[in-house]
Image (cartoon, helix red, strand yellow):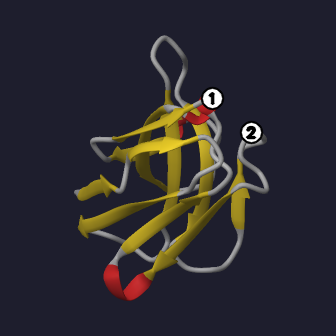
Amino acid sequence: QVQLVESGGGLVQAGGSLRLSCAASGHTSSSYTMGWFRQAPGKEREFVAAMRWSGSSTYYGDSVKGRFTISRDNAKNTVYLQMNSLKPEDTAVYYCAVGALVSVSPTMWGYWGQGTQVTVSS
């Protein structure tokens, strides 16, 4: 069992930045993939970014490439999502997830955090 707790969400003006954190605990593995998804009201959950707990490859959804950066601190068991140049369309609940492989499909991920709200005002 893995527990994930997101933090760092809030209200920010368009063009601003936020850094989300995801703290992992429980039965973690270096083979896990860490990812971020987001979901706006009435919309499907959307893939944002992912990386392996070990290794350096990163993956991003088309809508956030060049603006968002995923990173990790293994010593703190924490994954981050640095969000720059935020747009109103980035407004959503952001979820941290753990899975075996990188996938854009939420159904392929086994563990989820509770989510943190990000609101970008225009």
Q: What residue type is labelled 2?
A: Ser
Q: In which quarter of the image is residue 117?
A: top left
Name, please, the residue furthest toward the top: 42
Residue at the image position 30 percent from the left and 66 percent from the top? 24
Spot occupied by residue 109 in the image (x, y as percentages of width and height): 47, 44
Q: Can residue 107 be seen in this view?
A: no
What quarter of the picture does the N terminus occupy?
bottom left
Above or below, comparing residue 8 to residue 38 in the picture: below
Rate crowding at label 1 as few (under 14), some (14 to 19) or many (20 or more) other CA atoms within 10 Å.
few
Relative depth, front residue between 56 and 114: 114
Above or below, comparing residue 102 to residue 62 in the picture: below
Rate crowding at label 2 as few (under 14), some (14 to 19) or many (20 or more) other CA atoms within 10 Å.
few
Spot occupied by residue 40 in the image (x, y as percentages of width and height): 49, 23
Name, please, the residue furthest toward the bottom: 75
Residue at the image position 63 percent from the left and 29 percent from the top? 89
Circle 1 sits in a helix, a strand or a loop, which is it?
helix
Q: Check whether the beta carbons of the residues at disc 2 and disc 1 lie within 8 A of each other.
A: yes
Q: Quadrant of residue 51?
A: bottom right
Spot occupied by residue 41 in the image (x, y as percentages of width and height): 45, 16
Q: Distance between the residues labelled 2 and 1?
A: 10 Å
Circle 2 sits in a helix, a strand or a loop, which is it?
loop
Spot occupied by residue 60 in the image (x, y as percentages of width and height): 71, 52
User: Which residue does the numbered mark 1 point to in the structure image?
Assistant: 89
Residue 63 circle label: 2
